[in-house]
Every structure is written in C-alpha cells, then in structure tokens.
Amino acid sequence: MLSNCPVLTYYHKTLDDNRIEKWEKHIFNNVWEYGISGSTINKGYNNSNKVEIIIPFCIIENVDLFSIGDIVCIGDSEEIETQSDLADKEHYNIQTISINNYGSNPHIYLGGA
C-alpha cells in the first residue's frame, strides 16, 4: 500500500469510572492520508475541511480501537485531556469507519471532518 503520511496520532475516547472523558493516544506510522480543504456558507462562513485515512491491518493491533467521535491528528502530537488541547493542530473528528479486511491490501478506512 502506498503511504504519504509518516506519522498519524489517533486519540480514542474512553470514560473512566466517574464517566469523565479520557483520551488514549495511539501512533500509527506510514498511513495514507488525503485532506480536502473547503468552505461553506451556512449562516456565515465556515471551514469544511475533510480527511480520508487508510490504515493497513498490518500495523493495527486492535480493530475495536476505532470509534465514531475519536480524533485524528496529522503528525505526532502530545497527550491531551480535552479536545480543545488540539486547537493549534490539524485534527479531525472521525465520522466514518469502514473495515475492509479482504483483498491484497486489508485496511481500515477513516473519514472525518
């Protein structure tokens, strides 16, 4: 599989015993990333940047790690406590997950905005 993103940071949201959000950091190397920049005018000017990411199965330890609402950050990022800690980084919320475990290049597809 072709790779154009040397490092991707994935933040998986979990809840502790007190139902407080915690973010688990995971690093994936050599993934495919395609970002789409755009804008919309809906009650004002808004950015509508989107991303598509393909992570090969050969670098994934746990398929159950991926969930809607998790965050991906292009590049290596630090640990976070809240999503606002990534305000100055290029990051996306995961909106689509597709597990493609067939063919010669099994992978997980992530789509986000």
Image: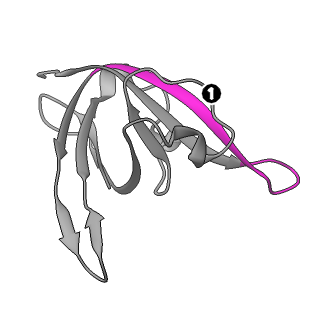
Q: Residue 100: x percent and y percent? A: 24, 44
Q: Which residue is mark 1?
A: 79
Q: Where 108 falls versus 31 (above or below)?
A: below
Q: Secondary structure at mark 1?
A: loop
Q: Residue 2: x percent and y percent? A: 11, 22
Image quadrant holding the N terminus, namely top left
Residue appearing at x 79%, y 53% in the figure: 20
* Observer-nearest of 66 and 77: 77
Count of all numbered marks drawn on residues in the image:
1
* Observer-nearest of 17 and 85: 85
Residue appearing at x 31%, y 83% in the figure: 43
Q: What main secondary structure does the magenta stretch of the protein show?
A: strand
Which residues are the magenta region?
Answer: 15-30
Residue appearing at x 42%, y 39% in the figure: 72
Residue 17 lies in the magenta stretch: yes
Using residue 67 as the reference point, say whether residue 39 is left or right of it.
Answer: left
Residue 5's image quarter?
Answer: top left
Q: Residue 61: x percent and y percent? A: 47, 25
Residue pushed farthest right?
18
